[in-house]
Image (cartoon, grey):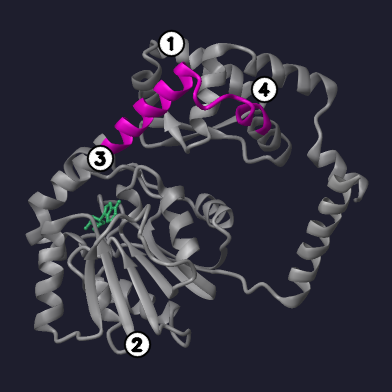
Amino acid sequence: MSNAVEQSEVLSSSELVSVLKAAAEPTRLRILVLLRSGELNVKDLMQILKQSQPRLSRHLKLLHEAGLVERFREGSWVYFRLSEEARFEDLASRLTGAVDPSDSLISRDRERLNALKQDREKSAQTYFEAHAGEWDRIRALHVAETDVEAAMLKALKGVTLDVLIDLGTGTGRTLELFADRYERAVGFDVNQSMLAYARAKISQAGLDKAQVRHGDIYNLGLPTEEADAVVMHQVMHFLSDAAGALAEAGRILKPGGHLLMVDFAPHQVEFLRDAHAHERLGFSTGQIAEWMRGSGLELTKTVELAPADAGTDRLTVMLWLATKPVVTHENNATENLAIENKEFLEGI
Ligand SMILES: C[S@@+](CC[C@H](N)C(=O)[O-])C[C@H]1O[C@@H](n2cnc3c(N)ncnc32)[C@H](O)[C@@H]1O
């Protein structure tokens, strides 16, 4: 290992002391444990920890200054996540990993976090129940549908699409768009009203290789490495756990398979949260790349489609294409060697 790599992975003694001091306080430790499950904003933390905003802001400031936590703004909300810098990430994961998950405070926090996420998903589902009939109009509000769909077809041109999985299929338009490319396609959605429209569309269009299923993006119940391609079109910004959804997409993809995600670039159109149940105000390519890496995927292509009349509330649509790397013989050999070394050392 080179000196440069070693340097980037360790902390100076003063940094380590400030990290340990920052973590050595009950509320701050609970915040770190909560952030292991994904990004949260102060409002979320207030609801879970039942503490005032000024108090939590002080704790978050200390964690941020120590390097354990990163902050980023999205519209008028500020989100926090565990640092993605290797040396802080490693330490945060060791510290939080040492906490007993059955500890009463920790398990209560986890229950409150799960309840919060379920509430969010419920309000998105109420929205879709009310708007299922007009979704095909809403989906084209920002960039012309023809442009987005042409870019989607181009992104997946020439790649194997025998088994296509469409996550959050809604009214099933993606199944129709790629109909002449797949041998079998399944669209998953949790919303029965949306699925009713998708079923009607599939039957009217005579798509006999496509079907839709009631299912949850976070737990699809599909075998591992089942899909040649997974598509998520305008789904991520409704989810309370985007990283969890990507992990499940990565799991069901075959090695060499592709994930095509279509969603919005970061924006400030705050009213979309209330009026259209948007959980997130778009995503940066850096954030998407990081989540993809965490799910064993590599971001290979980014396409930006700006709205024709910028300056209004119309948003830029992004396409992110990722592949699941094929594990080569050489990679395997290195992994096997690492396992053998570990077993050898454990045997000593
Ligand atoms: C904005 S619509 C997009 C529909 C379709 N992909 C399209 O582009 O027309 C998002 C869809 O994701 C679905 N959805 C949200 N959360 C989900 C989850 N946890 N599991 C499955 N589907 C979900 C919603 O019910 C909704 O139909």
Task: Name the mark on residue 15.
Answer: none
Label 4 residue near ligand 1, CB within 8 Å: no
Alpha carbon separation for disc pair 4 and 1: 19 Å
- Residue 100 pos. (x, y %): 56, 24
- Residue labelled 1 has its Cβ within 8 Å of some atom of ligand 1: no
Identify the residue under disc 1.
Answer: 54
**Which residue is denoted by mark 4 in the rendering?**
66
Q: Is residue 279 left or right of residue 253?
A: left
Q: Which residues are magenta?
A: 94-118
Residue 47, by quadrant, is top left
Q: Is residue 96 left or right of residue 275?
A: right
Report how far apart the C-alphas of labels 2 and 4 lie in the structure. Answer: 51 Å
Residue holding disc 2: 181
Q: Nearer the viewer, residue 228 or 152?
A: 228
* Residue sitting at x 36%, y 31%: 76
Distance in Å between CA atoms under marks 2 and 1:
55 Å
